[in-house]
Image (tube, grey):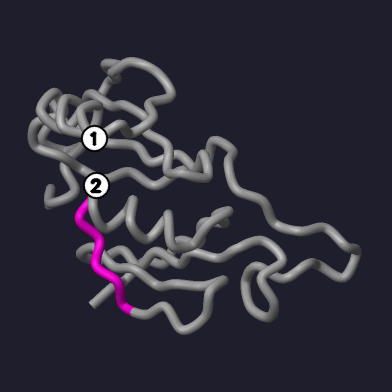
Amino acid sequence: MATVSVRYFVDDVDAAIAFYRDHLGFSEVMHPAPAFAMLARGDLRLLLSAPGGGSGGGQALPDGRVPEPGGWNRFALQVEDLDAEVARLRTAGVAFRGPVVDGVGGRQVLIEDPSANSVELFQPTRAEARLDAD
């Protein structure tokens, strides 16, 4: 059961579903309307909303502003072999924001979904940086 929900605004919900399912191992929980879908991977529930997509998370605010995709906020997915994941995703044509970088707790790279939302792939190099660290 998911314990964390993240909402991403996407230009094309169907393209986003395919990206997260086919490249990152998410499963589709529901897609009840063209402007909304819910996906899951482990403890993460990913809500995909089209900007201005009717009621719900994608609707315009009272002042007229509409949510939009992109930006630098992101969620991170832990991987065991970052180099292998990068090679697999490059072969599949996934967009990268830059090269793999080495940080203080691990190695990481940013990829983009079809709406230019960031996803960080993270390979820990320190035990305490692992998601399963106790």
**Local crowd at mark 2 within 10 Å, few (<14), some, or many (≥20)?**
some
Q: Residue furthest right?
A: 63
Instruction: Give the residue at x 63% y 78%.
Output: 56
Q: Where is residue 28 shown, x and y percent of the image?
A: 29, 71
What amino acid does circle 1 point to?
Answer: Ala
- The answer to if 28 sits in the magenta stretch is yes
Instruction: Give the residue at x 13% y 23%.
Output: 83
Number of marks in picture? 2
Where disc 1 sits, the SS reads loop
> Which labelled disc corresponds to residue 10?
none
Left or right, residue 78 beside residue 54 = left
Q: Is residue 69 above or below residue 6?
A: above
In this rendered view, identify the residue nearer to me: 132 or 16: 16
In the rendered structure, which segment of residues is drawn in magenta? 23-29
Work out whether mark 1 precedes mark 2 in sequence or the reverse, and give the earlier one: 2
Mark 1 vs 2: CB contact within 8 A: yes
The quadrant in which residue 81 appears is top left
In this rendered view, identify the residue nearer to me: 124 or 113: 113
Q: Where is residue 124 shown, x and y percent of the image?
A: 17, 32
Mark pair 1, 2: CA separation: 8 Å
Q: Quadrant of the N terminus?
A: bottom left
Where disc 2 sits, the SS reads helix
Q: Residue furthest bottom?
A: 32
Q: Where is residue 96 shown, x and y percent of the image?
A: 38, 26
Q: Which residue is mark 2?
A: 23
Q: Nearer the viewer, mark 1 or mark 2?
A: 1
**Local crowd at mark 1 within 10 Å, few (<14), some, or many (≥20)?**
few
Instruction: Give the residue at x 51% y 39%.
Output: 116
The quadrant in which residue 44 appears is bottom left
Q: Where is residue 27 shown, x and y percent of the image?
A: 24, 67
The quadrant in which residue 25 appears is bottom left
Q: Which residue is mark 1?
A: 92
